Amino acid sequence: MCARPWCGDAGAPVAVANVHFGWHDGKRRRKYYYARTRAEVRDKYRKAQRALEEGRSLGDDRQKVGQYLEWWLTEALPGTVRDTTVVSYRGALRSNVIPHIGHIRLAKLTPQHVQAMLTAIQDKGLSARTAKYAHAVLRRALGQAERWGMVTRNVATLVEPPRAVRPEVRALAPHEVHALLDAARGDRFEAILTVAIAVGLRRGEALGLRWSDIDLDAAVLRVRQALVYVDGDLRFVDPKTKRSRRTIPLPSVSVQALREHRRRQAAKRLAAGPSLDRSGPGVSVGDRWADGPQQPRPPLPRPV
């Protein structure tokens, strides 16, 4: 260790030490540590030496939190979570984290910075649930930085997120269900509403149903995928959890609605004839629950 006294800009004595950690393009690579006393700078030096011995990076003191988070979103996160989760994390970080602490150097981030961020999020009128989610995503991102030796500790774990009260969900009453289905009778949404209500499908699961997933004679459907928007594009994805992949018996009202839906689709295809648009995922507009413009997409199995 090379530790020597030095005077800062304000004239106060400062101890400085440098660590040599290899060569790059014929030049010696050094990292400097500063402190008010020799003891403090010696402690920093020893921690740096230990990091090198353990094969950990000494980090880049100039990298900002925002720069690291953008890199994490595009390089480290994809492939470890669902595409929809990447989109959700990106929204949380870019809307509620980077604007508040993105300018701070990663190595200088403190629990006080994270706490101030959470307070600022709620001061904007956003919910405690939003602040808690932003904290959770930041904690995950900093956890990777800690494992890679880019930071000495994950400061987000030292901050208690706000308590979020889960909103009470009110289910439709029986008379409301009947009123909804009566209003949808004969509409192109009748089948999806009937099936979703009868068997409790998630929205993406219901939209992702294909005729190959449904056996009307046996009165069962199989949940094998979901249809979701990712970056403005529709994609088939795996069900949310392993337990979500399941086989569900269909009540007679759902079977009847699906048979009628299929009959209307067949009539529509017959009427359209050769002019039927089969661009996009190799299906017609009528093959979907709701009519809408076709967009170029890779070939996908035919949905209901």
Image (cartoon, rainbow, N blue to C red):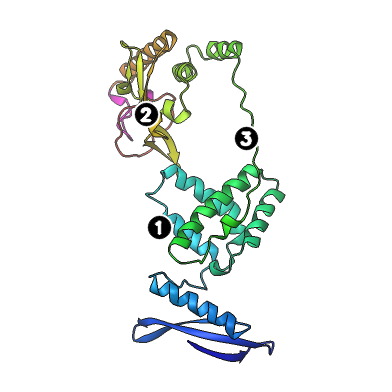
Work out whether residue 30 or residue 292 is closer to the camera in this orientation and state it: 30
Residue 25: percent from left, percent from top: 34, 83
**C-alpha span from label 1 to label 3:** 33 Å
Please tell me which of labels 2 and 3 falls first in the chain: 3
Disc 2 + disc 3, Cβ < 8 Å: no
Q: Which residue is mark 2?
A: 245
Q: Which residue is mark 3?
A: 166
Residue occupying image coordinates x 42% and y 23%: 289
What span is colored magenta in the figure?
Answer: 274-286
Q: Tell me: residue 22, above or below residue 277.
A: below
Residue occupying image coordinates x 35% and y 39%: 296
Local SS, label 1: helix
Q: Tell me: residue 113, above or below residue 131.
A: below
Local SS, label 2: loop
What amino acid is labelled 2 in the image? Answer: Arg
Residue occupying image coordinates x 62% and y 42%: 129
Q: Is residue 113 magenta?
A: no
Residue 29: percent from left, percent from top: 41, 83
Q: Viewed as shown, does residue 12 lie left or right of 282?
A: right
Q: Which residue is mark 1?
A: 75
Work out whether residue 62 or residue 190 is closer to the camera in this orientation and state it: 62
Q: Viewed as shown, does residue 92 lie left or right of 223?
A: right
**Looking at the image, can residue 8 be seen?**
no
